[in-house]
């Protein structure tokens, strides 16, 4: 037998005025798309505010991301104009290309309205530019790789100067510091602003062959089947064939190199201008190869002397003109490449087949 409270039955279909008000509040909140909480129950703690695109800081009506895109477009446009101008005036091998152009691009990136840190903006911008250009240049990626440390160095210097001037609110001092980069960017523009280009490298070998066999090998062309040094395999044109017709004065020698970076194949022609027992000197008479972009070959000298009946000491000496500026950066790189070439000549041209 169930017991029941008569008051419950009497009030089952009726709400008190207070309950009715609470019910109306809940219904209104539900229709408004919100959540209603009973006054006796505390609402949950609010979570972290969500960041939306509309909350992104604006400057002159544009968001930071929009300014970043505009800055990159401006950098590409100005950089392309300067690049074409340098080629038009035959200044593509000077410091204006490898220091001046990066400095201008770095200034544009550092002065972007959206840049919090000039140095950070410069590094990110240079990285983006290099990543975009590398696939477009084909074999020219090697030049980008070799020059990229210089690009970053110039960019970081410009960025640090800009950041320092902003923190100290000394724009004039920053401008003066930036002007100090100008002389460095002008190296190679004229003979007055050019560091001596002539250089010489020398490599020695002991060949396991008689001196007469070494002389006979030198009289012919080098063997292009000999593997090149690792450095010369990246970006430098490969020798495809070679020829030579003796060691007498006037004898012609040459190498046919493959094309590179879109340039056609070309030949390096040399002529014997001095010949003595155990010594020969050749001068470059024409260079139509891609090597001319990095170095201008002047002379190649080879001397040899018998150590005993089966061993010969051989010395290869190459004189060349450095083609790229600045000298403090490209000088050591070109010297290393030419030293590798001098060693390769000894291995492929002064060493008889049986002695390799």
Image (cartoon, helix red, strand yellow):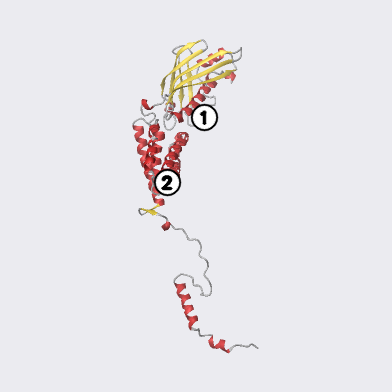
Residue under pointer 1: 231
Provide residue 121's location: percent of width, then percent of height.
43, 45
The quadrant in which the N terminus is found is bottom right
Q: What element carries label 1?
A: helix
Judging depth in this view, the residue of 171 and 270 nearest the camera is: 171
Provide residue 132's location: percent of width, then percent of height.
44, 41
In front: mark 2 or mark 1? 2
Labels 2 and 1: the sequence-earlier one? 2
- How would you rate the neighbour count of disc 1 (Cα within 10 Å): few for under 14, some for 14-19, many for 20 or more? few
| In the depicted structure, whether residue 206 falls above or below residue 25 | above
State the count of labels: 2
Q: Is residue 154 visible?
A: yes
| In the depicted structure, whether residue 34 falls above or below residue 143 | below
Residue under pointer 2: 167
Q: What element carries label 2?
A: helix
Residue 285 disc label: none
Q: Residue 73 is drawn in which quadrant?
A: top left
Q: Residue at x 63, y 88 (%)?
A: 3
* Contact? badges 2 and 1 (CB < 8 Å): no
In the displayed image of the protein, which residue is found farthest to the top?
Answer: 277
The quadrant in which the C terminus is found is top right
Provide residue 286's location: percent of width, then percent of height.
41, 21
In the displayed image of the protein, which residue is found farthest to the right?
Answer: 1
Q: Is residue 245 visible?
A: no
Provide residue 337's location: percent of width, then percent of height.
49, 27
Gap between marks 2 and 1, in whole Å?
Answer: 44 Å
Judging depth in this view, the residue of 308 and 271 nearest the camera is: 308
- How would you rate the neighbour count of disc 2 (Cα within 10 Å): few for under 14, some for 14-19, many for 20 or more? few
């Amino acid at each position: 037998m169930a017991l029941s409270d008569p008051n419950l039955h009497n009030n089952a279909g009726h709400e008190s005025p207070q309950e009715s008000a609470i019910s109306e509040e809940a219904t209104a909140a539900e229709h408004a798309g919100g959540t209603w909480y009973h006054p006796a129950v505390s609402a949950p703690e609010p979570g972290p505010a969500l960041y939306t695109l509309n909350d992104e800081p604006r400057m002159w009506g544009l968001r930071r991301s929009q300014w970043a895109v505009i800055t990159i477009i401006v950098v590409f446009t100005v950089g392309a104009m300067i690049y074409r101008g340098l080629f038009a005036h035959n200044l593509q091998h000077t410091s204006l290309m490898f220091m001046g152009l990066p400095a201008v691009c770095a200034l544009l990136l550092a002065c972007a309205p959206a840049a919090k840190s000039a140095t950070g903006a410069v590094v990110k911008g240079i990285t983006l530019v290099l990543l975009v250009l590398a696939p477009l240049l084909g074999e020219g990626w090697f030049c980008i790789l070799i020059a990229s440390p210089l690009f970053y160095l110039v960019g970081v210097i410009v960025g640090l100067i800009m950041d320092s001037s902003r923190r100290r609110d000394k724009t004039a001092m920053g401008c003066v510091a930036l002007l100090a980069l100008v002389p460095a960017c002008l190296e190679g523009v004229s003979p007055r602003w050019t560091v001596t280009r002539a250089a010489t490298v020398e490599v020695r070998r002991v060949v396991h062959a008689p001196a007469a066999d070494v002389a006979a090998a030198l009289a012919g062309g080098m063997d292009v089947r000999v593997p090149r040094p690792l450095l010369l395999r990246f970006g430098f044109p490969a020798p495809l064939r070679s020829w030579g017709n003796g060691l007498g004065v006037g004898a012609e020698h040459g190498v046919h190199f493959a094309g590179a970076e879109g340039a056609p194949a070309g030949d390096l022609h040399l002529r014997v201008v001095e010949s003595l027992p155990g010594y020969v000197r050749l001068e470059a008479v024409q260079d139509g190869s891609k090597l001319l972009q990095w170095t201008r070959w002047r002379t190649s000298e080879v001397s040899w002397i018998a150590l005993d009946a089966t061993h010969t000491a051989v010395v290869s000496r190459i004189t060349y003109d450095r083609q790229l500026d600045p000298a403090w950066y490209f000088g050591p790189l070109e010297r290393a490449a030419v030293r590798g070439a001098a060693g390769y000549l000894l291995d492929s041209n002064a060493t008889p087949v049986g002695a390799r």
